[in-house]
Amino acid sequence: MKMTLAQRLEQYTLKNPQEVLIVQIALDDTEDQIMIFKGFSSSLMRPTAFDPDVPVLAQDAQILSIDRVVSPYLPDDPQYIAQGLTLTDMENLLHEAGISEEVS
């Protein structure tokens, strides 16, 4: 069984609770910002389903950029670890953290 990118990013934040991921996406000509923290995802621009099994990050979403921010996230004064990461950059971090697509 394979994990989705959203599940892998959530796993990353479980392994790195000192970080918040802010993911910029495009889906159906609409942009969104998704915050991922301690294994949970939430949209910063639209309502998020109450059910945590409903994915916030759609599999067909285009990742525009990912920011790594120090937790706690302060929207008025974010402390960036890294900004503007590409999906490839994040895939490298996931690999370094031992988070693969395959569920063991």
Image (cartoon, helix red, strand yellow):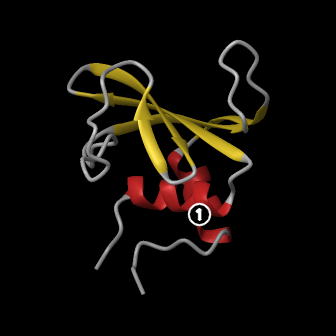
- The percent position of residue 97, horizontal first and vertical second, equals 66, 69
Q: Is residue 81 left or right of residue 42?
A: right
Residue at x 38%, y 24% (from the top left corner): 32
**Residue that sits furthest to the left in the current view:** 28
- In depth, the one of 80 and 61 nearer the eye is 80
Picture quarter containing residue 1?
bottom left
Q: How many marks?
A: 1
Q: Residue furthest bottom?
A: 104
**Element at label 1:** helix
At a point 27% along the width and 43% down the height, the residue shown is 58
Tell me residue 56's x, y (percent).
32, 40
The residue at the point 39 percent across, 79 percent down is 102
Check the picture and name the quadrant holding the C terminus.
Answer: bottom left
Q: Is residue 28 above or below residue 97?
A: above
In the image, taking residue 1 as reference, residue 20 lies left or right, namely: right
Q: Position of residue 78 (x, y in %)?
A: 73, 23
What residue type is disc 1 on?
A: Leu
Which residue lies most toward the front here?
Answer: 50
Near mark 1 (Cα within 10 A), the count class, few <14, some 14-19 or many ≥20, is some
Residue with the mark numbered 1 = 94
Q: Is residue 24 left or right of residue 80?
A: left
Residue 99 image-quadrant placement: bottom right
Q: Position of residue 86 (x, y in %)?
A: 56, 42
Residue sitting farthest toward the top: 76
Q: Residue at x 59, y 60 (%)?
A: 14
